[in-house]
Amino acid sequence: MEQRPELAVDPVRPWARAQVMLPVFVPFSLIGGLLPSFSLAANLYVLALGGGMMLAGMSSRLPRRAAPPTLLPGVAWWLVPIAVFVVVEVVTFALGSTHDYPTLSLLADPLLDGYLLRSLAYFGWLAGFWGLVRR
Amino acid sequence: MSLTRFLAIAGFVLAGLAVLAVEWAARRPDSRVPTVGDVAALVMRYDVSGIPVGRLAILSFWFWLGWHFLAR
């Protein structure tokens, strides 16, 4: 049976499977959760961790999935959530990012002060990298 | 809670729900909407004179998100 080229997927290396990589991110997330926002330690940790992962992501050593040759015509639907977010963020930012006009980061800050949510946010950030880097 | 704060939170929630809805629609059989992964994949394959500009842009945005929410 002939396989269409745009559907061809590189064989996944065992270490590159999500079941292997995602648990690796757990200790990094638990450590990151200990470091408070605006601290030097948190800045250095994100710079080191994110910088190292960006270098890995820019190299061609990590396995990548086949990209679609073109985008489907319904791609414009993605403009809906983007437009809603941009409008709210720009308006609240322009009005000073205050309690009455909060930007997303102002709303997120108190949530990310807690260890559990902060660690989960680190895990989501790292998992997001893994989702992107194989593209 | 003031009305403007409520509207701002509702706007962000609406944007998040819209992301979930579009992604759900994209994953349906024979969908004409690409998944967010497909969109990212195509952008990340964009090169200019051999320089992976798309990949650099997407990964830089990922890095900025982590720095903005977790470090600064």
Image (cartoon, helix red, strand yellow):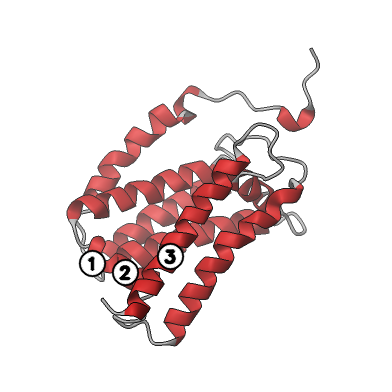
Task: Please give the residue where the numbered disc 3 appears in the rendered image.
Answer: B12
Going by the numbered disc 3, the residue's amino acid type is Phe
Mark 2 element type: helix
Q: Quadrant of the N terminus of chain A?
A: top right
For the residue marked with disc 1, what is the amino acid? Answer: Pro
* Left or right: A85 in relation to A19: right
Pair 3/1: label in front: 3
**Label 1 Cα neighbours within 10 Å, binned few <14 / some 14-19 / many ≥20:** few
Which x, y percent locates residue B33? Answer: 68, 45
Answer few, some or many: residues within 10 Å of disc 2's Cα (few below 14, many 20 plus, some between 14 and 19): some
Q: Which mark is residue B14?
A: none
Please name the residue shown 39% across and 28% down the image. A20
Dot 3: element: helix
Q: Pointer 3 indicates a residue of which chain? A: B
Badge 1: chain ID: A
Q: Which mark is in front, 2 or 3? A: 3
Q: Spatial distance from mark 3 to mark 1, Cα to Cα?
A: 16 Å
Vertical order, A26 against B14 (above or below): above
Give residue A125's position: percent from left, percent from top: 39, 51
Chain label for disc 2: A
Is label 1 in contact with label 2 (beta carbons under 8 Å)?
yes
Identified by mark 2, the residue type is: Leu
- Answer with left or right where residue A118 lies relative to residue B5: left
Q: What SS does tag 1 mark?
A: helix
Whether pointer 2 and pointer 3 mark residues with C-beta atoms closer than 8 Å, the reply is: yes
- Cα–Cα gap, marks 1 and 2: 7 Å
Q: Nearer the viewer, residue A27 or B12?
A: B12
Q: Which residue is mark 1?
A: A110
Number of marks in the image? 3
**Residue A107 tag number:** 2
